[in-house]
Image (spheres, helix red, strand yellow):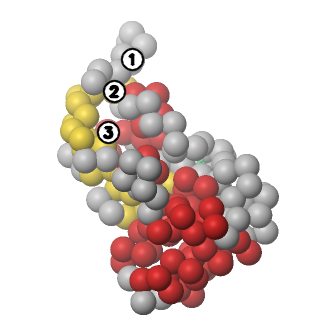
């Protein structure tokens, strides 16, 4: 896959494993990872809100760690593994936390949801205690709709199912 850059812009060739698939592209060095994913890879599940690291909507996993993709350049992802929200479900089969977010009414407009799904997935894989997972969501993500109660319930249910 190739991304074009405006003439006169410094570009660099990168190869990134995106959701398990190698993606090779020529990108402008100033391209944000969030823009690379949305516009270069057509993975629009990664949302962009504040573009300054505050809202958490753009969160993806880089080598397994939750990262604000609006604060990272695409060239910094060269040679690394990136997971987006599109990777969580296996076909129609949702991950446990995705299923619980739906069951516990953890989303309304859904704008914040991809970022929360990725941060909580990272916490789940790390084996974080449920209290830390709840704090991580509350501290690292802005949700203007839900009041967080449904998200907390979904986290608790997910951790209970893992026990
Ligand atoms: S868009 Fe990246 S933190 Fe808000
Ligand atoms: S569900 Fe609308 S911002 Fe969170």
Return the residue at label 2: 27
Task: Measuring from the top left, give residue 18's x and y in whole percent.
Answer: 30, 43
Q: Residue at x 55, y 53 (%)?
A: 114
Q: Are marks 1 and 3 in contact (CB under 8 Å)?
A: no
Whole-percent x, y for residue 35 in the image: 48, 34
Label drawn at residue 5: 1
Residue furthest out toward the front: 92
Residue drawn at (39%, 10%), measured in percent from left and top?
Answer: 7
Give residue 82's position: percent from left, percent from top.
33, 50
Of the pair 108 and 81, the residue shown nearer to us: 108
Q: Dividing the image into 4 quarters, which one contains the N terminus?
A: top left
- Rounded to the nearest angstrom, the CA distance separating label 1 from label 3 is 14 Å
> Badge 3: how crowded within 10 Å, few (<14), some, or many (20+)?
many
Q: Are marks 2 and 1 in contact (CB under 8 Å)?
A: yes
Q: Secondary structure at mark 3?
A: helix
Q: Marks 2 and 1, Cα distance to the nearest angstrom?
A: 6 Å
* Residue 69, numbered label: none
Residue in view at x 46 percent, y 58 percent: 94
Say which of 85 and 99 sits in front.
99
Q: Residue at x 23, y 30 (%)?
A: 24
For the residues labelled 3 and 2, say whether their Cβ atoms are less than 8 Å apart. Answer: yes
Mark sitting on residue 75: 3
């Amino acid at each position: 896959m190739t991304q074009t850059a405006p003439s006169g812009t410094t570009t660099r060739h990168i190869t990134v494993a995106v959701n398990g698939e190698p993606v090779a592209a020529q990108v402008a060095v100033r391209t944000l990872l969030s823009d690379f994913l949305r516009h270069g890879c057509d993975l629009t599940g990664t949302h962009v809100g504040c573009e300054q690291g505050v809202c958490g909507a753009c969160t993806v996993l880089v080598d397994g760690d939750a990262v604000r993709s609006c604060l990272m350049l695409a060239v910094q992802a060269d040679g690394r593994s990136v997971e987006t929200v599109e990777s969580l479900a296996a076909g129609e089969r949702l991950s446990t936390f995705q299923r619980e977010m739906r069951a516990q009414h953890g989303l309304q407009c859904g704008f914040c949801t991809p970022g929360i799904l990725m941060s909580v997935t990272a916490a789940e894989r790390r084996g974080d205690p449920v209290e830390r997972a709840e704090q991580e969501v509350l501290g690292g993500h802005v949700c203007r709709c839900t009041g967080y109660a449904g998200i907390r319930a979904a986290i608790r249910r997910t951790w209970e199912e893992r026990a």
